[in-house]
Amino acid sequence: MTEDTGRPENARFLRLAWKIGAVGLFIFIVGCFFVDPVSWGLGVLLGAVCTLVRYGMMEHSLKQTLQKENGSRAAQYALVQFLLRELLFVVVFVLAVFVPWIHPLGVVLAIIGSLAANRWQSWEDKRQGRVDKN
């Protein structure tokens, strides 16, 4: 728990996660009018889950990097974690391209849609004057 707010440490992540889900649902609904709903839905779901996993990995990496004593080891750890997150994107994109029942555009739009969810979260935090210190 954080001392000043009384909320769990992952409250910010959870607020962002439901926004990513809402944006993904919007992308899914719009896309269903144009392509096969099953492959489109699997693509959007894969993109949204990949984004959530990537944000979770980023948060964990940041916490672990800040706990390192040695600066060069911290930089090395952060670089390896960054490369793992990028590798996750590559694997997801390759999977989307080569698996016929996953729509690649759904994956791409869900990942890009996470940027909209991130902006939405920033706007909401700014509007409410909320600044997390964790």
Image: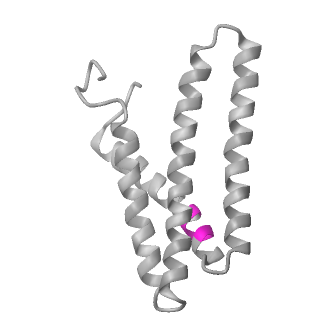
- Residue depicted at x 77% and y 15%: 72
Quarter of the image for the C terminus: give it: top left
- Residue depicted at x 28% and y 43%: 128
Total numbered circles: 0
- Image vertical order of residue 110 relative to residue 53, above or below: below
Magenta stretch containing residue 110, yes or no?
Answer: yes
- Residue depicted at x 67% and y 44%: 85
- Image vertical order of residue 90 relative to residue 36, above or below: above
Say left or right for 68 vs 117: right
Magenta stretch containing residue 38, yes or no?
Answer: no
Residue 78 at x, y percent in the picture: 69, 28
- Image vertical order of residue 60 relative to residue 109, above or below: above
- Quarter of the rendering containing residue 68: top right
Residue 8 at x, y percent in the picture: 29, 31
Q: Residue furthest top?
A: 69
Quarter of the image for the N terminus: give it: top left
- Quarter of the rendering containing residue 95: bottom right
Q: Residue furthest bottom?
A: 34
Magenta stretch bounds: 107-111
Which residue is more in the foreground, 104 or 4?
Answer: 104
- Residue depicted at x 70% and y 41%: 84
Say left or right for 2 vs 134: left
- Image vertical order of residue 18 relative to residue 14, above or below: below
